[in-house]
Amino acid sequence: MTLRIDLNSDMGESFGVWKMGDDEAVLPFVTSANIACGFHGGDPATMRKTVAAALRHGVAIGAHPGLPDLQGFGRRNMAITDQEAYDMMVVQIGALAAVAASQGAELRHVKAHGQLYNMAVKNEGLSHALAQAVHDVDSDLVFFGLAGSTMLPIAEKIGLTVASEVFGDRHYMPDGTLCPRNHPAAMIEDVSESIRQVLQMVKQGTVTALDGTLVKVRADTLCIHGDQPGAARFAQAIRDALLAEGVQIGV
């Protein structure tokens, strides 16, 4: 069986004169763009420009809704209800869908951002709210969720197509969750280490946690964060390594 994986990256997270990431440099090496919708990052002009850039590169467009926390970049815990989560998802997906439609395009997927994503991984009610919002806006949208988490079966039960997501530049905890951002070992900054982890996840269906535990994962889509230094170099090296191993790249 030929292995195949989608490469996704978070994009469009600049805001006003504040610049985050180098989207144009990363786009040639990925197949899906998760575009910020104005809550944790992004603004109307950035959303328009990022959609246009993704279209130029033939990259699938997805909404990347987050918590309403520009100052904290959506990476801080917030006490929100399931209804509040649902409402903010609907608004953000709808906004990016309108921007895409204005350029003759459609959204393919939705991936929650940052702490909204991490909170849902451990909270069934929140997972349900996120998935229900996606379904109610457009049931054809693919729902991205952390491999092995409660997010995926909940979304499938609602009726969504899901993509099991793994991370090439993040370390894992023994329970299969991502190492918290405030942990000194949260990020993988060595390209060769990242490639080893990616190939293990894609070809063997496991990832080695920080304590050495082997955690089972299904790798449908691989996230490469666009906001870390050298993101384009990471993306190109990982893509090249996958292709060299006979893995197809695409949505």
Image: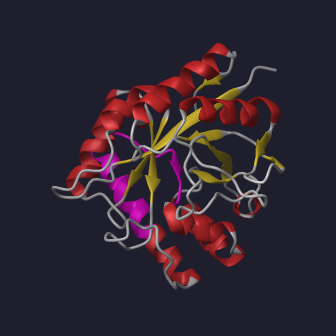
| Drawn side of residue 236 relative to residue 156, left or right | left
Residue 139 location (% of width, % of height): 59, 56
Residue 52 visible in the picture: yes
Q: Position of residue 137 (x, y in %)?
A: 50, 62
Q: Is residue 205 left or right of residue 225?
A: right
Q: Relative to 245, is 107 above or below?
A: below
Q: Let me know if residue 132 appears in the view.
A: no
The quadrant the C terminus occupies is top right
Tell which of 4 and 232 is nearer to you. Answer: 232
Q: Residue at x 48, y 25 (%)?
A: 236
Q: Which residues are magenta?
A: 90-112
Magenta span includes 94: yes
Vertical placement of 67 versus 108: above or below? below
Residue at image x 64%, y 31%? 5
Residue at the (68%, 36%) spot, across then down: 197
Residue 196 coordinates in the image, percent (x, y): 68, 31
Residue 109 is inside the magenta segment: yes
